[in-house]
Amino acid sequence: MKIVVLGSSGSAESANRACSSYLVNSEIVIDAGPGSYKNFLKYGGNPLKIKYFLISHLHGDHFFDIGAFFWGMSYYGRTEPVTVIGPKGVKDAFDSLIKFANTPRTFMRFDVQYIEIEPGKNIELGSLKLNTESGKHSVQDVAYRLGSLCYTGDTSPNERIVRLCKKASLLIHESTGFAENEEYLNSVGHSSARQAANEALQANVKKLLLTHIPPSISNQTAKMKAEAVKIFKETIIAKDLLELEI
């Protein structure tokens, strides 16, 4: 399985980071934050190969570029349907976004099929099994396990995610701040680097990728990694266009 980081920033883009997005095996896009479509093209992604979008939750930094993806897919002549999986409300949100953008009916020639998944439900995604759980955030967050890959979306520490990610090869976990800010971070549904490392340790995963790094601390990743590796040594800091194989 090949994973490419299309966006690693949290809340807003920074000069060097698009918002949350990850490409899996050239066919699956997990979240589609602002700036991610440009990175998708920069990487060399083919808009005609995408089969699925997995959306963790309906905050703009995780889905605003869905319009860019859809328009790009239309521009390149896509006619095959695409499936969007996400929390309740994802269909209305995306339909509204496309309508708000005044997307011509004749321009978008492919169908969008929606699966509004209840956390805890599991489905088949081609040859891969997709397992889900609920994160702890200010809105409903769906954490995904795709084969041996786990992605938290946005969440404060959560025992359900630990269970979901048991013995995964890679855990992509949000890391929105540092240990001294945990009380505030948790109150708004986020985790520190230390807490992400603790969940990786509890879940006995092989590697931890810290992501969702806000612009205000984007230049403090050394501190973030230092806090995490004290607990979980196999920690990597996400950066845009980073490629990983599991």
Image: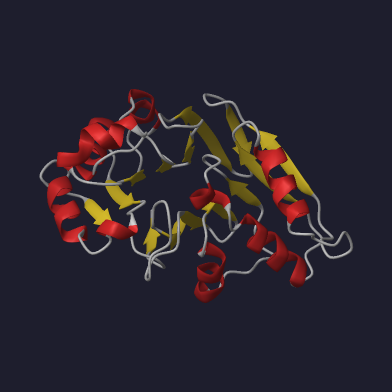
The residue under the point 45% across, 54% down is 20
Q: Find residue 209 and report its horizontal and vertical position in percent.
A: 31, 51
Q: Residue furthest right?
A: 106
Q: Please state which of residues 66 and 208 is positioned toward the viewer in this rendering.
A: 66
User: Is residue 206 in sight in this rendering?
Assistant: yes
The residue under the point 72% across, 64% down is 71
The total number of labels drawn is 0
Depicted 223 relative to depicted 128: above or below: below
Depicted 15 relative to depicted 81: above or below: below
Depicted 12 relative to depicted 116: above or below: below
Q: Residue furthest left?
A: 230
User: Is residue 5 in sight in this rendering?
Assistant: no
Q: Find residue 244 and report its horizontal and vertical position in percent.
A: 37, 60
Q: Quadrant of residue 16?
A: bottom left
Q: Quadrant of residue 88?
A: top right
Q: Quadrant of residue 106?
A: bottom right
The residue under the point 26% across, 35% down is 184
Horizontal side, residue 227 vs residue 213: left or right: left
The residue under the point 18% across, 53% down is 225
Horizontal side, residue 195 vs residue 85: left or right: left
Horizontal side, residue 99 vs residue 35: left or right: right
Horizontal side, residue 117 vs residue 62: left or right: right
Q: Find residue 195 and report its horizontal and vertical position in percent.
A: 23, 37
How does the figure colour the protein chain or chains? secondary structure
Q: Please state which of residues 101 and 211 is positioned toward the viewer in this rendering.
A: 101
Q: Find residue 234 and report its horizontal and vertical position in percent.
A: 20, 50
